[in-house]
Image (cartoon, coloured by chain):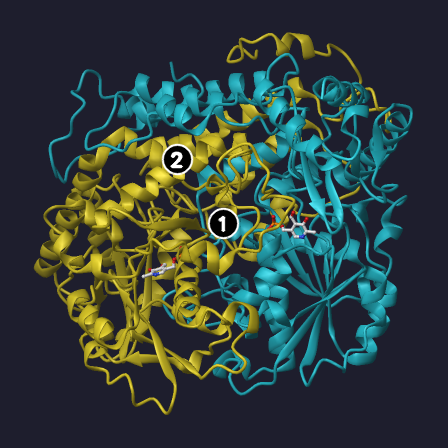
Chain colours: A cyan, B yellow
């Protein structure tokens, strides 16, 4: 049975025909049965392989199995009860969860910036889960403390920094927030102990297409969303007169490299000039576009990024590292990150340890428990190399180009703009829907979900009514998938 | 080979003797080879089973394989290069990562509050990783939106609330921070848009044994660590005169149910009286002790918890759900969580969707991407039932009791105090070390790490010099492990 496990413990632990229930609180017996547990895990692995990774990536199968919430709740029988269930019932549950979940690795999942699958990354994630440790001390995470430093070094190098600092954070929103907090601390170190009370009002600058996490961050940090000054365009961000905001003190500019919807890149060099002149912290939110730095051909889109003070970069998006994988990178070499966030808890960060205390990186974070997010990226980087990543990026650009060209040949498709990146934003308007453009996307979206053939997102933006945003980056995508995409939009919308 | 995968796609995808390298940017071919990838994942799974789950939980094997950082860096060959590596080399890397990582599932890992393994939880975590979705909309996470709501409901029920709100957060520190932010918003809704500037100074109350995340949170939220008023003891927290703090406005009291080091429980009912009187938000940090609510016998330790406004509870600690799994629970039924955190991003939370928009829970969070942390807990709850969890909690208490009794029979062991919970804090002082008590623990710790026989934490606290903190909760622990623990402390310290 357990032929994958050749070590002695399995046979040792085999408990033959022992009854299932444990004697309550017998201190001689563990409450976990390894053999049974490992069998369950093995069976789950088979289901994952079959349902999620084989069928779930096969275009002959659906990308989603739409159910109304009430029906789905019934199907899943979610209720938590007093007594447990037998293994076969639990395996059925695993199967159901897989069945009714969205197949985000499917080539026809283009709904978000995290579709696709990379098997090396996934292997790294399984290993991370099994090792279940916390990235705060060298003591409990020796491998990952060193590995995280190396991965951050590799990413910083692409930004153009030979030195610096950084941390993996639970998502790009958190990375952006961290940057804001560190910038604030650099300008006003007393804020850590005394808070904002007594300080002047602070201002943050960003452009209208920036990610909403800038506003969420400003609210969370006590700065306030009204104090996020939104430039109507990225270029206008540079011409902002930073002193006119009614006595407020500007301290932070958040540029975007790869905006969420349009995939636009702010002119970093121009903004850097303004930041230098006014001594503002320059942050680059490259959560989406950062991975372009791997590509010789396209890295010019982030020209000047090395002049930033901080960069957020999400390998869980374009590199398909898997959720979550977001790096905050800092140019700082003065230990600002630790100074800003440290609390020096003695139960974790004892001062009389027998190894270099700088390896206990946990106090750089505002988290205590912190997941290991570096292994998956490290393993895939080892597997394909920087060249492999560059190839993926270049292919994504070409694929987006191909899609745009095909779109131009077809009736009814209207580009929002020529894409700068791999976001292809467009309206599809059948003749009957002229004047009712904004109503098309929601209907087509509902139809595709209910038929399960594909998933793509739509949204309004500024004064533009609902348009589709296709994001082309998954290494699973082929030209055929692009063609299918266009055919399918037409098919779903033709009778409107 | 791939016998676990019976669906057609594998055979379809088998690419026989095709060369490894892809034609650069051929749009007809995906950059991911499913067959090769799935084989790699399968091989990784075998290594995980053997190294992490069999050997890694077997007392005949070491809990850690200590290496000096420099040596370990060399052994791991961490450097990220331009070109990729062949599969067998990558598998060796998987093996190395497993080998040199701490075996946190090992029965002799008692270093932290997350040791042990639960196979159902682990199966849920593997499935979560494979499904790789984001808990923000029903569209991309239909199963998990419903499941999270159900799990939160189950946890709230144990707190004593039939209604309410909540969210899984990336760790207990984040949950505590969320609570602070929501309380602040409830007191001063304008803070979201205007920030703290113009508001009076705010005060937070907590006791000296509370977790450091209260201070970290206060700093991050712009409140300032000096504005966290630390009561010298939990009882004193109730007698605080809340009006004397120089014009500051108190708004938040953070009680602890199960303190990190001592495992103490604040008197919630008494504190609730004070909070009610002064209209303060009462938060209970039950990150560590919350799971006690499953036990009929011990839940009195949290008596009065239902009177709180919010509760943080980490099933990744005592329930061994695996990192990360932390719930923030709210008594509120006025949608405070969403109002406080929402940014209404149109690209995610379209208003013209074809399903109930309340199912798009993402805007309750300050994260954008949010990992699915509920499946692992749901699956293990289904597997063992509330009764199974209660059994584990009761057993942990008994196990701790047993350890204490044995300790009292041995020379050289001195309890810091009678434990209230499963934290057993003690000094071990061989005769020669009288007067040098604080120096013992670091030496024993170094020895146990280097020999790899077990891991347990130590710390100073207040005016107490270094003492060990043993946390007894893993369902893998037996009486024999307790005996071993004491023998081993003696063995490692006897020649001091
Ligand atoms: C430009 C940009 N910044 C930040 C984020 C937030 O990243 P995360 O979802 O990891 O919080 C996103 C996510 O879509 C993004 O597109
Ligand atoms: C009482 C208490 N609160 C909060 C936390 C923080 O939880 P996390 O490590 O998930 O951030 C801990 C962790 O040790 C804790 O013991």
Q: Secondary structure at mark 1?
A: loop
Q: Secondary structure at mark 2?
A: helix
Residue carrying label 1: A371
Examine the image and state in which quarter residue A41 appears: top left
Give A403 or A373, whichever is nearer the viewer. A403
* A92 horizontally vs B132: left or right: left
* B270 horizontally vs B342: left or right: left
Classify 10 Å Cα crowding around label 1: few (below 14), some (14-19), many (20 and above): many
Up-down: is B5 above or below A422?
above
* A397 horizontally vs A21: left or right: right
Examine the image and state in which quarter residue A165 appears: bottom right
Please name the residue shown 64% across and 72% down the image.
A227
Numbered disc 1: what chain? A
Indicate which label's residue lies in the foreground, 2 or 1.
Answer: 2
Give A216 or B479, whichever is nearer the viewer. A216
Up-down: is A103 above or below B491?
above
Q: Report the label total.
A: 2
- Establish whether labels 2 and 1 are both on one chain: no
Please name the residue shown 45% across and 84% down the image.
B200
What percent of the width, then of the height, locates residue A352?
A: 42, 71
Residue carrying label 2: B147
What percent of the width, then of the height, locates residue B474?
A: 27, 44
Give A352 or B247, whichever is nearer the viewer. B247
């Amino acid at each position: 049975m357990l032929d994958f496990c050749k070590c002695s413990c399995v046979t040792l632990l085999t408990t033959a025909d022992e009854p299932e229930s444990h004697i309550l609180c017998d201190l001689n017996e563990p409450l976990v049965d390894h053999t049974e547990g490992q069998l369950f895990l093995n069976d789950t692995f088979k289901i994952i392989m079959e349902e999620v990774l084989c069928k779930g990536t096969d275009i002959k199968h659906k990308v989603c199995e739409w159910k109304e919430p009430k029906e789905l709740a019934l199907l899943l029988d979610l209720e938590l009860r007093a007594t447990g269930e037998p293994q076969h019932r639990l395996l059925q549950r695993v199967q159901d969860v897989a069945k009714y979940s969205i197949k985000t690795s499917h080539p026809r999942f283009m709904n978000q910036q995290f579709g696709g699958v990379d098997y090396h990354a996934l292997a790294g994630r399984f290993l991370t889960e099994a090792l279940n440790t916390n990235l705060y001390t060298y003591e409990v995470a020796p491998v990952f403390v060193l590995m995280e430093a190396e991965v951050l070094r590799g990413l910083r190098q692409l930004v153009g920094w030979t030195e610096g600092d950084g941390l993996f954070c639970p998502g790009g929103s958190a990375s952006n927030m961290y940057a804001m907090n560190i910038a604030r601390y650099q300008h006003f170190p007393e804020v850590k102990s005394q808070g904002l009370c007594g300080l002047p009002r602070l201002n943050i600058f960003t452009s209208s297409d920036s990610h909403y996490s800038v506003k969420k961050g400003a609210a969370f940090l006590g700065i306030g969303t009204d104090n996020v000054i939104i430039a109507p365009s990225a270029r206008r961000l540079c011409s902002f007169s930073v002193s006119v905001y009614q006595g407020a003190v500007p301290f932070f500019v958040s540029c975007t490299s790869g905006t969420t919807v349009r995939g636009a890149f702010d002119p970093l060099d121009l903004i850097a000039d303004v930041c230098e002149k006014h001594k503002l912290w320059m942050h680059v939110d490259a959560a989406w576009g950062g991975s372009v730095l791997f590509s010789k051909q396209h890295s010019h889109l982030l020209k000047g990024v090395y002049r930033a003070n901080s960069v957020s970069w999400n390998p869980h998006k374009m590199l398909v590292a898997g959720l979550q994988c977001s790096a905050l990178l800092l140019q700082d070499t003065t230990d600002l990150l630790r100074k800003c966030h440290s609390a020096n808890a003695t139960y974790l960060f004892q001062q009389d340890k027998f190894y270099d205390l700088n390896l206990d990186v946990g106090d750089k974070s505002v988290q205590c428990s912190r997941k290991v997010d570096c292994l998956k990226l490290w393993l895939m980087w080892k597997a394909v190399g920087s060249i492999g990543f560059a190839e993926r990026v270049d292919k994504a650009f070409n694929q987006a180009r191909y899609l745009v060209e095909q779109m131009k040949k077809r009736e009814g498709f209207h580009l929002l703009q020529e894409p700068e990146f791999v976001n292809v934003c467009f309206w599809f308007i059948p003749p009957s829907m002229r004047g009712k453009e904004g109503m098309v996307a929601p209907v087509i979206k509902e139809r595709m979900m209910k038929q399960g053939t594909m998933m793509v997102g739509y949204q309004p933006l500024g004064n533009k009514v609902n348009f589709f945003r296709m994001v082309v980056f998954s290494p699973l995508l082929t030209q055929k998938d692009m063609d299918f995409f266009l055919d399918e939009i037409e098919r779903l919308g033709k009778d409107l």
